[in-house]
Image (cartoon, grey):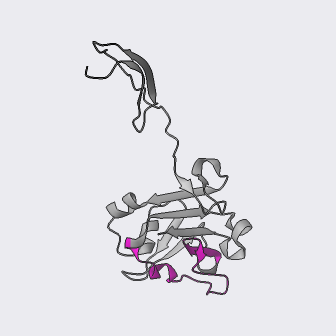
């Protein structure tokens, strides 16, 4: 009631449910409308990735194995350092050398075989040392909006220093 007479289309959306729509014609007296939201059986991640293809695409549409961590996930973990953001990511092991340190191992490789980037700009390259390094510690954890990890095949797009994978920190 209280809605001016006319034709209306009502839409309802809620994460995890299919969008519902209904057309309604309101006369002078008003009208009662019921919407039913149907749960989705499979929820496909709507995450967007930049690192895997060098341009923004849905994570579901890229052939590479990509993991993304958003700012809300990272803030729940109360990170002391940026490498801690990678702990628990599939295919990534973080070697902690001290409280503030940590070197990511992606697919068993580290150092100059895992490319570290900040906003798409190289933080490390193939001239850096072979073993574990602490370069990711130079990125402030509170400045992170998203972290993208591409496991394998990064060397096709980024060169030989990405043979294990690519870690891109987006601020």
162 relative position to 48: left or right? right
In magenta stretch: residue 133: yes
The magenta span reads 113-142
Of 112 and 140, the residue lying toward us: 140
Residue 105: x and y in percent read 55, 72
Residue 124: x and y in percent read 59, 81
In magenta stretch: residue 2: no
Determine which quarter of the picture holds residue 64.
bottom right
Residue 144: x and y in percent read 43, 69
Relative to 136, say whether 29 is above or below: above
117 relative position to 97: left or right? right
Relative to 109, say whether 30 is above or below: above
Of 124 and 20, the residue lying toward us: 20
The N terminus, quarter of image: top left
Residue at image point 53% right, 83% down: 133
96 relative position to 33: left or right? right
Of 103 and 44, the residue lying toward us: 44
Residue at image point 65% right, 52% down: 62
Of 70 and 28, the residue lying toward us: 28
């Amino acid at each position: 009631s209280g809605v001016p007479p006319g034709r209306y289309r009502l839409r309802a959306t809620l994460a995890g449910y299919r969008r519902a729509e209904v057309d309604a014609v309101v006369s002078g007296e008003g009208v009662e409308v019921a919407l039913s939201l149907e749960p989705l059986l499979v929820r496909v991640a709507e995450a967007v990735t930049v690192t895997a293809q060098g341009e923004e695409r849905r994570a579901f549409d890229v052939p590479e194995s990509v993991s993304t961590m958003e700012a809300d996930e990272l803030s729940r973990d109360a990170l002391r350092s940026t490498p801690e953001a990678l702990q628990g990511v599939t295919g990534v092991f973080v070697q902690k050398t001290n409280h503030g340190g940590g070197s990511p191992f992606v697919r068993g490789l580290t150092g100059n075989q895992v490319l570290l980037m900040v906003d798409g700009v190289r933080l490390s390259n193939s001239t850096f040392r072979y073993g574990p390094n602490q370069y990711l510690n130079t990125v402030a954890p509170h400045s992170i909006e998203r972290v993208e990890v591409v496991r394998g095949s990064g060397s096709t797009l980024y060169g030989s220093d990405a043979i294990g994978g690519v870690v891109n920190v987006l601020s």
